[in-house]
Amino acid sequence: MAADFLAILDKSNASKAISFEPGQLVFRQGQSVRWLYRITDGHIRLSRVLMRGSEVVLARVTTGEILAEASVFAVHYHCDAFAESRSLLQRYPIRQIHALLSGHPGAAVAYSAHLAAQIMDLRTMIEIRAIRRADDRLLSWLRFRSHGNPPSIDGQGIWPSVAKQIGLTGESLYRALARLQRAGKIERPGTKVVLTVRPKNTP
Amino acid sequence: MAADFLAILDKSNASKAISFEPGQLVFRQGQSVRWLYRITDGHIRLSRVLMRGSEVVLARVTTGEILAEASVFAVHYHCDAFAESRSLLQRYPIRQIHALLSGHPGAAVAYSAHLAAQIMDLRTMIEIRAIRRADDRLLSWLRFRSHGNPPSIDGQGIWPSVAKQIGLTGESLYRALARLQRAGKIERPGTKVVLTVRPKNTP
DNA sequence: CGTCCGCTTGACTCAGATCAAACTTGGTGG
DNA sequence: CCACCAAGTTTGATCTGAGTCAAGCGGACG
């Protein structure tokens, strides 16, 4: 659904499937933009390295989502992309994307809507990163990213990169997780994190 | 140029000019989306209020730029917009925008490109906000937002909202400004801030 | 003329960073 | 099957830099 506008290209043989090992580079900041990717399976991390050497995770993209969508009109990729797990990507030549957007009236509108949704997500991330206390920050992120009822999320090996995404060190993040659990705000069966839903009218 | 795709609507009489006083509300989070705005003159601040009551500035939009572009496909505005100075906005009904994007092949592509650029800017803001030391953070923001040669920016009354945009308190921001000046990284003639350009090959 | 802001500086506090150490887990290769 | 290693996870002690509170100045504006 997030990639409706790519369906047309899937029917032609324009795209190609490529797999990546954990830690493997998909593209690097500064490389010229040649492909748009859709994640068939796995997790990709978009990040930049600051002058001091620390890494900022700009986004963590997962199954079904699109990678490098904002780079379609750019000359160079503006951040690094690494596989966080064994991942399978579908790769679309940028030329084909351009042709699709120009040639198909609905595609460009759908693409705009997709980008607009991205902008709102990024603003939400900025809001979350602006929360001072580590517990509140992490809890907001968990609320934002969890799904289901009760809302839950699989934490298998994601915490180090989540920490870099919400602006915490690994240690602080694990401490925050422990505090949230002690406070009864979350539960951690196995590798999962389940948000304990607050009963209504109980502030 | 940022609003090329609005030119067609400017020729028809679809839009209307509206002026705002400093501090006046343009729209509030949760209101249903009725208009897209282009700033003819002035500064608008997009912000949200956190649970603890503090304000996060998500963006500061200025003359020539567009407001609420990401809300075109949304039902409700997702943040508050306030005028920071006496501002003049051009107001376009959302219906007209939709019609323009669907009806005009090039418009949707131009709009996509515009949104993609927004995404890159937002990611840059996330990167800047991730810089730990206040001095480096402010300096990066100044580099990002200044223009001209030598790069400079008019600081007239903007610092309180800049502080909220880069995640500092007013006090910390003024201290950082003072330190940067003492370190010779910036100069402050009048209300301006001028970046002192580092000669090449001098790390 | 008084009030509200923007601006500035100082003293103190505190949450998260940093450094350090240990344990678990999964995978690799002998 | 086990030794080994890398990465994730957990906990403790200490440090640091931005937040907070407080006070004062100056200019804009009614």
Image (cartoon, coloured by chain):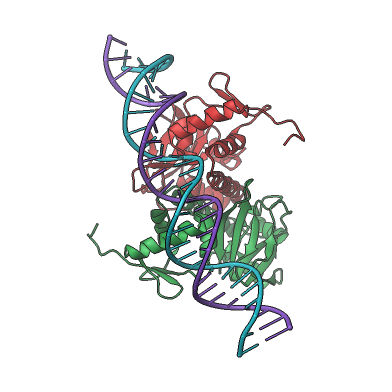
Chain colours: A green, B red, C purple, D cyan
The front one of A52 and B168 is A52
Residue A196 in the image: state x and y as whole percent: 33, 67
Q: Position of residue A135 (x, y in %)?
A: 39, 56
Position of residue B177 relative to residue D18, above or below, is above
On screen, residue A77 versus residue B30, left or right, reads right
Q: Position of residue D17 (x, y in %)?
A: 50, 40
Image vertical order of residue B74 relative to residue A182, above or below: above
Q: Within the image, what quadrant is residue B164 found in?
A: top left
The residue most toward the right is B201
Q: Quadrant of residue A18?
A: bottom right
At horizontal 52% and vertical 38% (from top left) the residue drawn is: B134
User: Where residue B90 sits in the image (x, y, percent)?
Assistant: 48, 34
The answer to whether B35 is drawn above or below residue C5 in the figure is below
User: Depth check: B1 or B164 in front?
Assistant: B164
Identify which residue, A202 or B183, lies in the foreground: B183
Res B160 quadrant in image? top left
Residue at image location 60% in from the left, 46% down from the top:
B117
Would residue B7 be visible to someone looking at this image? Answer: yes
Depth order, front residue of B66/B172: B172
